[in-house]
């Protein structure tokens, strides 16, 4: 237990956990602003932030970029838009934009895994927790998602430009060769907890894909993605 605290922040009794989540980008905007004010005014809190930054940054040298299998992006588009639309978008098949941050994806996965390992556990470790880093596809939208089977929910934080007037970002689950399933709309610059329907929870496993498209307000009315793909990533067990 630390001998300092974060004013106005609910930290479950240990502000060090909150600081680790802050460094990982998992705090909501209001808490993040409060923590930044505390860092600016309290040298001890600032030192704690630097500790976690150093703790996680040291992982950068341990991971190498991995080239995805050929056609991965085309298959994602096929599940989102259907085969005909995917063929019309064939120019994306050879695009390297989706994979330009492969190293960052590996590092973000490592950060979450290490944070769970070094932080005091709150209870029995659930099985098959998943983490996915959704990388931008011809956009600046990135998402870090953590699936917790113990409560059947996705915790995620999204960064990037707002969807714009009359638009929303929509999150999709892609499992195997089945069509994409909508998980609802999300906003950028904020943390989300997305409950997963009990019927969908068995689909969550290592290798499933999460993707985000730009849709009309409220999401696609047809249950099939209508707008462009803006980010996607594959889940890894931790």
Image (tube, helix red, strand yellow):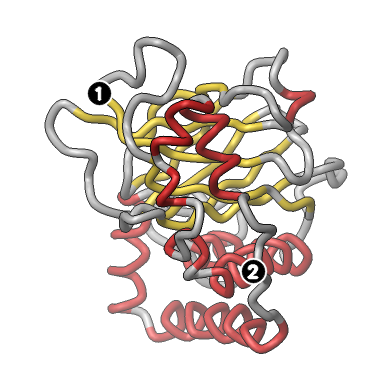
Rendered image quadrant of residue 169: top left
**Farthest residue, direction left:** 165
| Closer-to-camera residue (191/9) | 191
Q: How many marks?
A: 2
Provide residue 106's location: percent of width, then percent of height: 64, 69
Looking at the image, which residue is at 60% across and 62% down?
17
Report how far apart the C-alphas of labels 2 and 1 lie in the structure: 32 Å
Question: Badge 1 local density, few (<14 within 10 Å), some, or many (20+)?
Answer: some
Residue 2 location (% of width, % of height): 61, 71
Q: Secondary structure at mark 2?
A: helix
Query: Is 70 placed left or right of 43 in the picture?
Result: right
Give residue 49's mark.
Answer: none
Label 2: how many residues lie within 10 Å, few (<14), some (14-19) or many (20+)? Answer: many
Q: Image height check: is 47 above or below 149? A: below
| Residue found at x 57% / y 26% | 180
Question: What residue is disc 2 on?
Answer: 106
Q: Tell me which corner region of the image, top left, top right, bottom left or bottom right, holds residue 214.
A: top left
> Viewer-proximal residue, 8 or 186?
186
Secondary structure of the residue carrying numbered label 1: strand
Q: Position of residue 89 (x, y in %)?
A: 40, 41
Direction from residue 154 to residue 232 in the image, left or right: left
Q: In the figure, 35 relative to 217: above or below? A: below
Q: Residue at coordinates 64% horizontally, 49% vertically from top-left?
A: 234
Reading the image, the residue beneath label 1 is 216
Q: Residue at x 61, y 54 (%)?
A: 13
Earlier residue among tags 2 and 1: 2
Q: Is residue 141 left or right of residue 203?
A: left
Placement of 68 over or under 185, stated as above or below:
below
| Disc 2 and disc 1 in contact, CB within 8 angstroms | no
Quadrant containing the N terminus is bottom right
């Amino acid at each position: 237990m630390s001998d300092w605290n974060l004013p106005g922040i609910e930290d479950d009794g240990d502000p060090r956990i909150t600081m680790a989540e802050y460094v990982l980008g998992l705090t909501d905007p209001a808490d993040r602003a409060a923590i930044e004010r505390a860092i600016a005014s309290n040298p001890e809190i600032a030192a704690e932030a630097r500790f976690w930054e150093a703790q996680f940054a040291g992982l950068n040298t341990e991971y190498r970029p991995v080239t995805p299998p050929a056609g991965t992006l085309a298959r994602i588009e096929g599940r989102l838009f259907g085969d005909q639309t995917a063929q019309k978008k064939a120019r994306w098949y050879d695009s390297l934009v989706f994979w330009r941050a492969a190293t960052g994806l590996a590092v973000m996965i490592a950060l979450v895994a290490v944070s769970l390992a070094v932080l005091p556990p709150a209870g029995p470790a659930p099985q098959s927790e998943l983490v996915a880093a959704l990388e931008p596809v011809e956009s600046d939208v990135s998402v870090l998602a953590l699936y917790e089977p113990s409560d059947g929910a996705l915790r995620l934080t999204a960064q990037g430009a707002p969807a714009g007037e009359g638009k929303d970002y929509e999150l999709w689950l892609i499992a195997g060769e089945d069509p994409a399933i909508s998980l609802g709309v999300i906003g950028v610059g904020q943390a989300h907890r997305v409950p997963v329907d009990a019927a969908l929870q068995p689909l969550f496993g290592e290798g499933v894909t999460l993707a985000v498209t730009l849709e009309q307000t409220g999401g696609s009315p047809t249950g099939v993605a209508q707008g462009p793909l803006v980010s996607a990533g594959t889940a890894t067990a931790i």
